[in-house]
Image (cartoon, rainbow, N blue to C red):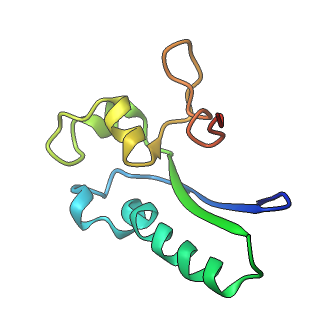
Amino acid sequence: WVVDRSHQRIVFIEPHGMMQSVAYIHDDKARLWEYLPSLAEDIARRSRPFVKVTLDSFIISASSFDDLQERYDDGTWNRLKFAEKHILFPELGDEYNYMDPLFPRSG
């Protein structure tokens, strides 16, 4: 939960094994991030004036990318597609750093 004068950003992070999950469209936990913006708007309306509220969620997959890729959804998702859907793998490298979506750079 990060707060400054005019903005609150709350991020839910779930360490989660994904081997039993098969399709994104049916995975409510994975899709939570899709529903949070409207909830954030509702919270902001009830908050003191001029406070922006951002809610977000990510899954940090306990299942490896290699294991999950062939089983999840249609089997064609790459790391970028998983990241776009807020499913991250705890890996750090030059081309993929799971921390980047958690701490987006502004401006």
Q: Spot the residue most to the top.
A: 94
Q: Quadrant of residue 5?
A: bottom right
> Quarter of the image containing the C terminus?
top right
* Residue drawn at x 57%, y 73% as measured from the top left: 40
Residue 79 vs residue 26: left or right? right
Q: Quadrant of residue 51?
A: bottom right
In this rendered view, identify the residue nearer to me: 15 or 48: 48
Number of numbered callouts drawn? 0
Above or below residue 101? Residue 31 is below
Estimate the x, y position of residue 22 in percent, counting from the top left: 23, 55
> Quarter of the image containing the N terminus?
bottom right
Above or below residue 69? Residue 13 is below
* Residue drawn at x 27%, y 35% as measured from the top left: 69
Q: Spot the residue most to the bottom.
A: 46
Estimate the x, y position of residue 34 in percent, counting from the top left: 39, 63
Estimate the x, y position of residue 93 in percent, counting from the top left: 56, 16
* Residue drawn at x 38%, y 42% as measured from the top left: 84
In this rendered view, identify the residue nearer to me: 26 or 106: 106
Estimate the x, y position of residue 77 in percent, counting from the top left: 25, 35
Q: Spot the residue most to the right.
A: 5
* Residue drawn at x 45%, y 52% as measured from the top left: 17
Above or below residue 21? Residue 77 is above
